[in-house]
Amino acid sequence: MTTQTELLSGNEAIARGAYEAGVTVATGYPGTPSTEILEAIAAFKPDIYSEWSPNEKVALEVAVGASFTGARSIVTMKHVGLNVAADPLMTFACIGAVGGLVICVADDPGMHSSQNEQDSRHYARFAKIPIFEPSDSGEARDFTALALSVSEQFQTPVILRTTTRISHSRSLVALRERAQPAKRAGFVKNPPRYVPIPVWARAMRRTVEERLPKLSSAACGSPANRIEMRDPGLGIITSSVAYQYVRDIWPEASVLKLGWAYPFPDELIRRFASQVKKILVVEELDDFLEEHIKALGIACDGRNFIPGLGELSPTVMRAARAKYEGRPPIAAPSRAQTQDLPLRPPVLCPSCPHRGIFYALAQFDVVVTGDIGCYSLGVLPPLNRMDTILCMGAGVSMTQGFEKGGEPKRVVGIVGDSTFFHSGMTGLLNIVYNGGSAVIIVVDNRTTAMTGHQPNPGSGQTLMGEGAPAASIEAIATACGVKRVITVNPYELQQTIQTLKESLEAKEPTVIVSRAACPLDEGKPVGEALAINTDQCQQCYECLSLGCPALERDEAHGLRINDLLCGGCKMCQQICPVEAISTKEAVQ
Amino acid sequence: MSANQTINIVLAGVGGQGILLASEIIARAAMAAGFAVKTNEVHGMAQRGGSVLAQIRYGQEVHSPLVERGAAQVLASLERIESLRNADYLAPDGLAVVSSQIVLPVTVSSGQATYPQDAEARIRTAFPRLIYLDAIGIATGIGNARCSNLVILGALAKGLVLPAEAWREGIRQSVKPRFLDINLRAFEAGQAL
């Protein structure tokens, strides 16, 4: 046993836990804040096989196959990814695991980088399976191993749920050695065990119900759940990172900390309730615990004092405590005048190829259905060239509804390469099959950029660094039945605008593949940094309509190109009406 | 510091300024000094040129990874107005270390907003204990503008009680060996302010 201690993020700690617990198969789809789990696991090759699957449903299905051979596996995704994987989850919960299978889902309270704020704990109750919630990196490592053994012991998938503040906070973890995976016999044919046709599915259904009280009993005695008795005047029931805030803001309170919250450990909750005078439930997002505790007939406070919108924090908790104790909140006077500070929203990087597509789209009066990725930023001013976002793949599918719903304008769908492989392909097939005529632009930057440049089926490389056949978006579009498939270089603005114009005029489904590698991923500038010839510049500011961070303007210095930021993509040069932008040498 | 006190540090800036490295160095320095440490950083969309915030807490025992408003002993900002945006994290008697560097947001360049011309005056009013410095200029003088984050760290170290050897160890563990010397010199230049 090693005693080395490391500073690990929650995500790295989960990866470490999977490694130490003898996991041999790890799958997932990138999504903030979950992405780094699988990236950290990839470093454990060849002990662990890891893959970025095209989407979360596929990732879970791969892991289920591995589980049926007896292998221990882990699947990672963000909260909305679990919606995609919900179909296999609900039935796998009935069939049950062989080798331990943990679904790691990362929620994003406060929506730091997500399109919704969803409390994935409901999936545990929905699927009737256990859920573990670590409160720091040490527990993230420990609970991963614990969840795997519970999965095997009770033949059930287990959810390991983190939040942004667990996944992206670092704390100390004492590393352990890897437990070698047990020797396995492989898949043992047994149709009633593995095939949920109704006759056998009814038996599985019964097994699920019979499993619940056994799991609840195990949760009561699990090291993941503990009572910390301090002042019996107030007992706080809490979980996840909220536990840490409680310890800071309510240091004297007794605490029931639920690291394994479902199936609810009723006996433990009752015991704690009998030891304290009053109960306050402190949980982030929904009143998942509170509702059940009240259903047990135990009086408690919770949502009446603890906000359910957005994320909790020590600051929020301090205010909640004042409210609970009937004191006015201590409103610290603000130090600085901040009301007029300019916002600093995320923007497309300098020389981002997506900028060319949005500039081109701005020339046409069309509806643009967008999707999830860096290109979501095209909705913000000054580009303003996206009209809707729903979920992964909807940028393609929704065009059909706009068209059939009677939208008078032409409709353009935008989807990234990774998102196209994830769930855009089926929407495209639908457009062709059901007589649509949308223009679909696949912004192919050769990587999954927003989450930090993960390879995808089009990249020609796997998570483990092996070469792979690069899927052709053009060939897939053609195979779906699209006859107009055109590839453009988005840095060539006139050509891109022209292609878009012709495609909007053609009344048939069209796929435009806008192909240029993400310069951040390439690690080198597109071209030489540019400069503005101030003698020639007419201050028309057309270049600023690109929303490029390298083009700077303020009252003190006027308009200039920040040559530390400029990636030399030359889009501003192409749209300058007086040719005032050129290479630095030419300008000087 | 008293035995049970938790030290809170907030680092503010813009994506790409080296905040995550600065955060790691503080955490490893505190570890080298024998403390428990927790840190939190913003990831994801905020990396695309947006505001970035890193929080570091250390002490005998640390619970929350997030710093409570009004509780930071030190607030360091690698960009001028990001210090104002996050001013309320700082304790009333806390030390502010602010780089005079301006990174213009796209909202300003595109004319949707203006960059406050009186930012420096506001900063001097907001922070009674202030080190206001041209970190880029100092780092450039040493030989690499990219080491400005280490200059800030050196100044920030004046508001903390960590042994010099712990800082050295934190820097050594966090930077590539061939950049160790210049980073140490940048740190010392910040300390000398």
Image: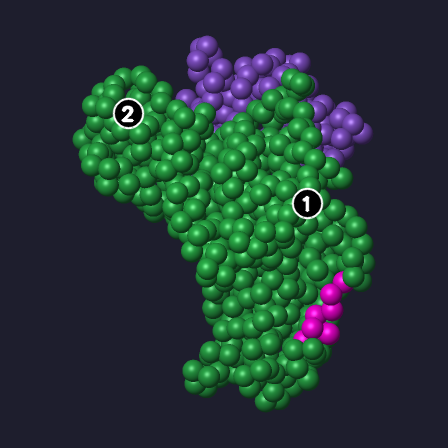
Chain colours: A green, B purple
Tell me, yes or no, whether the highlighted magenta stretch contains residue A475: yes
Q: On the image, numbered disc 2 is attached to which residue?
A: A271
Question: Which residue is found at the position 46% from the left and 56% from the top?
Answer: A201
Q: On the image, numbered disc 1 is attached to which residue?
A: A186
Question: Which residue is found at the position 63% from the left and 51% from the top?
Answer: A189
> What secondary structure is found at the residue carrying circle 2?
helix
Look at the picture and state if A118 lies above or below B54: below
Instruction: From the top left corner, tell me how far across and down residue B35 is, in percent.
Output: 55, 16
Instruction: From the top left corner, tell me how far across and down residue B159 is, in percent.
Output: 52, 20
Q: Quadrant of residue A9?
A: top right
Instruction: Locate the N terminus of chain A and report the quarter of the image it occupies.
Output: top right
Q: Let me know if residue A83 appears in the view.
A: no
For the residues beneath circles 1 and 2, the answer to whether they share a chain is yes
Give how far apart the Cα atoms at labels 1 and 2 are: 43 Å
Q: Earlier in the sequence, mark 1 or mark 2?
A: 1
Q: Amino acid at mark 2?
A: Arg
Magenta stretch, residue numbers: A470-477
In this view, the residue in front, A192 or A41, is: A192
Question: Which residue is found at the position 48% from the left and 33% from the top?
Answer: A134
Q: Amino acid at mark 1?
A: Gly
In this view, the residue in front, A452 or A332, is: A452
